[in-house]
Image (spheres, coloured by chain):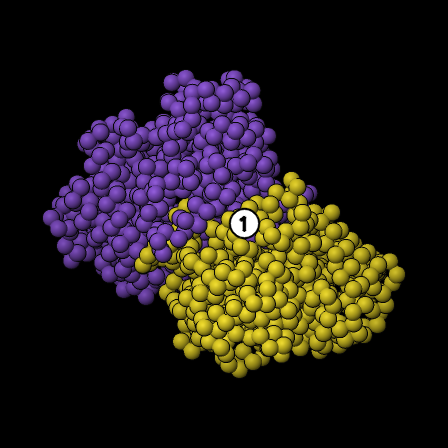
Chain colours: A purple, B yellow
């Protein structure tokens, strides 16, 4: 396979130059090697639409990245930068355009600095959450990372894709928690942003915006440059932790439950992630997936949920009352000094007592640092800044019927209100019924971000071409219907990036055209990750 | 006066078109009218370097802004957008390049929405902090704004200049607290960012980043577009407030004082702005300026401070001990439920007890909403989201010697440590001595941002050309020396924007060249605010 518009001779010349730059052993061209860059969770597996790399190059330093980019420019070779390629469900290591050479940054795995006093880290793209966690433990530093679950991915890669974690709001937003970047531009030049633009700056990781236009954001979810270093603010280790559970029993109670807890989070009274859910279905909180060993719901509930047209709410309410578990519930979390978090939980209960019949339940109380034994026993490790892979076991256990080989995430942003949840449940349930997809009528979205919900749900990926086709149709329908309701996705797998970019169409796609103007200016040969997030260089753009 | 390279006929034709767009009465060309756009705090007042407008145009809507921009493009007229032009000390209403037509957005003063449930506002550029505050009071909404002091400026204007306020960290950073923009581009097209790019979006002010590159940052401190609407997250009104004072008595105590309180702020235990200072000099906190009626320091202290080569620290320490007031101190602030903030203050005292001899003093306790009477009595109104102009009285009172007609702010970012403060005090005192400028050896910088200090100090502006010249020399020297120490300014008056942009020179000014590449692409005629923050369009760029 060759990149579009590139001759065999040009491609070979580029590969030869890449080898000179990074060493023969770090340029991959054999079918077996290149196959490793396929997206294992691809919904177009073995179909013509599958995005396949032509080769891969793994540089070891910023200088090598610069040289590779210069060569790519010379021969007009599209290069698709990945950090570690672990964002399974959103595209993995495969490029947005077939024929691209994957620029694999995994060898750039230096942890340049972890500063306890100022609570920040400066890392390269190949550094995983596990790497950073281990470094912090080895050096006994009193700072926490905020990691996604699973935590095997790249700290930079996840931030550049604007992923989220599960600790405090200021750290859960991985892109927003960054401070300072080093970027290799399409012309091969290296640039530093924020205070990094000041030689010998003393505050590169301490003050985000520097002087003049704040450019960092345009490198996220885009293809305007290759980030080779990035700083992140870390969470100072708290003294203690307290989790609490709240149960409410009427269907409409979800509305005040969300309103009151959201206000408390925005007031910093609740300072951990809120996990909404339906306690009658099983345990709440980040540990719920890994706890999926729990017995299935009783037959009575299963029967209610299976009723055609959805479960009758009065029956569900009666069931919840009888079971003594909320029809809706939320796990609230507090990090801080013991006395403070106890007072915060007390106040939270007081505010929520406005909901008739509300019940409270204490969750766990912890003090930090955790002992090794305690860590082993902890199911929801990510809530304490500890990366793990246990979520895979949970997901695996949930499989019934046709075996999934993976999943892709559909992730629209909806308002953080009960009304919006009810509307989204209905809209998505209708479509899911049409396509035979399993969407629970009691699902409540995630609160990765402070003032909105992510209505994330996972679509199965199989190796059955017909099943994948049908699922893709369903996915594309969801993108459209969702947009009609004013809900846009915040992130999507590579094969849907054009679809999603298309619905962000205000004023005849003014924003996309603005991206394209910048793209053509900063990358005139269009070599950096063509097609990523729906941004194509001029010569590849559809009319 | 005409814009550079524009003929009288072209200029007149443009003015005639502007009149058609906005109405005759909203195009200002007479000498008296245009003089109102002079920077009253200009350090080049009446000198050839003073930046003067050729005319001003005040559109009333986004559509009128679009039409003005299109006309400006047609005749290549530089237009300099201001919101209300109230950022005195950083440039005021005057353009960065003489001959520019000021685009005065003051008539676009609609408060489009203030949403209590989601705690946000959506406003136009002409809306001042006073306007927004009044609206919130009239509608009895339980949300606070975060305003700078003085609070007469534009909410959007201050954010676009990346100004700061004095409440909680998440709201103090006015640019970071924004969510969603509407921008008129140089080609006259209107674009919406974030979720605003999705037509009928339900979360424009609730989710910041949308899909694809996050472009908002490049419009701040720059000249790539004209913001015509912008959303801001507001602070939900807290239940109560508690202020506390901490005194330490040894010179070196400043180091742990800063370290411990910074960690507590980053842990959200202290959730209001920290005001560091030297209690022996007078009261701490945001009210200190307005409290300047207080008697001057005793003769003994004045004599110590005036000693050549600076005050001997052992003598100052002895003085502080005797006076029972800290040589260094900090005012800490807590917003939240009564029980929570009391526990936070307790914990803060416990942590700070690690400093031998530390003393604590309770400040005021308030519950909200404040009564009108209470508001009138409150000196530090901005700490409670209430805009005021009282700081002007404070500044005025401090004038001795040659009358100031204004001031400009020198505002380098330094690390948030005692060591950095000591070093900066020394460096800046040396220069200030050289130029006869008053810099106290006991000054401690501001903490507008969580992980760095702003070593803001005000330079006098007079109507004496010789004095201004000398002060400009001092200012430029400070910019250079500061940069040599790794401290960069976060913002500067228009006449120094080239100087400051110059020191952000990593890799042969890679960042500025990147800005220029974008500028040429998105504004090929270079009509939008040429020179702002040191970014010039191609035809005006120095070789």
Foreground pick, A468 / B297: A468
Foreground pick, A356 / B484: B484
Picture residue at 72% right of the left edge, 77% below the top: B397
Residue A480 spot, x, y in % from top left? 26, 48
Picture residue at 62% right of the left edge, 66% below the top: B2
User: Relative to B540, does residue B393 appear above or below in the rendering?
Assistant: below
Secondary structure category for the residue under label 1: helix
Residue A41 spot, x, y in % from top left? 32, 31
Picture residue at 26% right of the left edge, 54% below the top: A484
Picture residue at 55% right of the left edge, 70% below the top: B12
Quadrant containing the C terminus of chain A in the rendered view: top left
Q: Chain of mark 1?
A: B
Quadrant containing the N terminus of chain A in the rendered view: top left
Tell whether A517 sits left or right of B389.
Answer: left
Foreground pick, B289 / B100: B100
User: Relative to A5, does residue A532 appear above or below in the rendering?
Assistant: below
Which residue lies under the disc numbered 1?
Answer: B520
């Amino acid at each position: 396979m060759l990149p579009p518009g590139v001759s065999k001779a040009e491609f070979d010349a580029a590969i030869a130059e890449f080898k000179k730059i990074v060493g023969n052993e770090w340029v991959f061209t054999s079918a077996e090697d290149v196959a490793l860059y396929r997206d294992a969770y691809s919904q177009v597996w073995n179909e013509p639409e599958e995005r396949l790399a032509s080769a891969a190059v793994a540089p070891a330093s910023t200088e090598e990245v610069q040289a590779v980019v210069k060569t790519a420019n010379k021969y007009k070779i599209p290069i698709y930068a990945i950090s570690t390629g672990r964002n399974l469900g959103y595209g993995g290591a495969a490029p947005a355009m077939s024929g691209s050479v994957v620029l694999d940054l995994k060898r750039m795995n230096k942890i340049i600095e972890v500063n306890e006093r100022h609570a920040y880290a400066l890392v390269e793209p190949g550094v995983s959450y596990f790497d950073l966690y281990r470094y912090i433990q080895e050096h006994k530093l009193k700072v926490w990372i905020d990691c996604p679950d699973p935590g095997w991915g790249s700290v930079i890669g996840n931030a550049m894709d604007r992923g989220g974690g599960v600790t405090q709001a200021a750290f859960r937003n991985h892109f927003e928690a960054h401070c300072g970047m080093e970027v290799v531009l399409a012309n091969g030049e290296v640039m530093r942003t924020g205070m990094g633009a000041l030689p010998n700056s003393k505050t590169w990781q301490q003050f985000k915006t520097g002087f003049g236009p704040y450019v960092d954001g345009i490198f996220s979810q885009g293809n305007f440059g290759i980030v080779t270093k990035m700083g992140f603010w870390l969470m100072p280790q708290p003294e203690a932790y307290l989790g609490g559970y709240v149960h409410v029993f009427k269907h409409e109670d979800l509305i005040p439950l969300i309103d009151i807890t959201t206000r408390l989070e925005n007031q910093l009274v609740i300072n951990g992630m809120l996990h909404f859910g339906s306690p009658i279905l099983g345990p709440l909180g980040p540990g719920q997936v890994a706890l999926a060993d729990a017995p299935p719901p009783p037959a009575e509930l299963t029967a209610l949920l299976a009723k055609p047209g959805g479960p009758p709410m009065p029956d569900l309410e009666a069931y919840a009352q009888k079971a003594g578990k909320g029809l809706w519930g939320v796990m609230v979390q507090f990090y801080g000094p013991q006395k403070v978090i106890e007072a915060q939980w007390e106040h939270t209960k007081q505010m929520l007592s406005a909901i008739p019949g509300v019940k409270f339940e204490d969750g766990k109380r912890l003090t930090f640092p955790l002992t090794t034994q305690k860590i082993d026993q902890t199911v929801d490790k990510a809530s304490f800044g500890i990366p793990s892979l246990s979520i895979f076991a949970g997901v695996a256990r949930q499989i019934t019927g046709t075996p999934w080989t993976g999943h892709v995430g559909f992730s629209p942003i909806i308002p953080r209100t009960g009304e919006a949840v009810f509307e989204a449940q209905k809209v998505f349930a209708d479509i899911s019924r049409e396509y035979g997809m399993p969407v629970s009528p009691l699902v409540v979205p995630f609160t990765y971000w402070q003032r909105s919900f992510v209505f994330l749900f996972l679509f199965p990926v199989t190796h059955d071409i017909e099943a994948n086709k049908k699922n893709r149709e369903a996915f594309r329908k969801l993108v459209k219907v969702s947009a009609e309701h004013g809900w846009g996705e915040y992130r999507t797998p590579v094969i849907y990036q054009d679809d999603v970019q298309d619905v962000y169409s205000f004023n005849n796609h003014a924003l996309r055209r603005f991206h394209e103007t910048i793209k053509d200016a900063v990358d005139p040969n269009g070599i950096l990750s063509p097609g990523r997030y729906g941004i194509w260089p001029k010569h590849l753009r559809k009319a």
